[in-house]
Image (tube, rainbow, N blue to C red):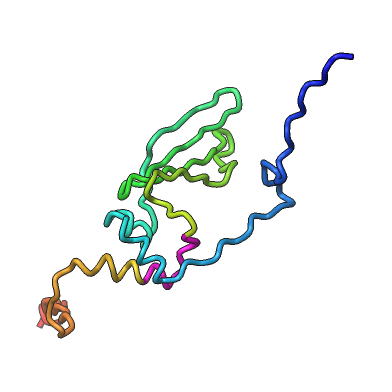
Amino acid sequence: MPARAALRPVPSTPLRRTLSQPRPAPEPATPDEVLAAAGDWTPQVIKCRVSRHWWDSHTVYRDRGTGTLEIVEKCARCAKVLRRHVISERTRERLTDYSYTYEDGFLVKDLGRITKAGRVQLELLSLADFPDGDDAPAKAKKAPARKTAAKKAG
C-alpha cells in the first residue's frame, strides 16, 4: 500500500474574515498613549491625524473589459497614506469602499483608535511650536466707512 502524503495542518483560526465574523472594535487609545506614540511622528503626520488627510490624485488604472477605473490618491501633506477606490465609467458610481495603504511609521501597533480627546492632545502638540503672542485677544480690523448713495445725492 502506498504511503499517504502528509496532510497540511489546518489553522485553528480562519485565514479570512467573513461577513458573519465582524472584526472586534479596538479599544480607543487614551490621550497619554497618543502623546507617547506622537513622539515618533513627523509634524505632517500629526497634522494629518488632527485634521485628516489632504488627498491628491496619484494614479488611475482603467480596465476596459469591466469599464471601471481604479483611482489611487495620496496624502499631499504626509505622503504616507494611499487611498484606493473603484468607480464605474458608465454610471459614475463608486463601486467599492475606500481601502487604505499605510507606510511604515504611520500606524502604531496596539495603539487603538484615536478619539476626539486624543486628537485634541495632538492639536495642542502641533500648536506648541507657535511663538507666544499677547495674552490679549486679537482686535478685529474696522472696515473702512463707505459712503452711501444718499450722502452722495445730498
Residue at x 76%, y 25% (from the top left corner): 6
Residue at x 27%, y 65% (from the top left corner): 126
- Picture layout, residue 92 above or below residue 19: above
Give left or right: position of 117 versus 88.
left
Q: Which residues are magenta?
A: 111-120
User: For the C terminus, which image quadrant?
Assistant: bottom left
Judge by depth and name the residue closer to the eye, 127 or 58.
Answer: 127
Residue 96 seen in the figure: yes
Residue at x 41%, y 71% (from the top left corner): 31
Residue 36 quadrant: bottom left
Residue 1 quadrant: top right
Residue 10, x across and y down, in percent: 74, 37
Residue 147 seen in the figure: no
Give left or right: position of 16 versus 135.
right
Residue 105, x across and y down, in percent: 37, 49
User: Is residue 116 on the magenta stretch?
Assistant: yes
- Picture layout, residue 141 above or below residue 6: below
Give left or right: position of 5 versus 98.
right
Judge by depth and name the residue closer to the eye, 154 or 145.
Answer: 145
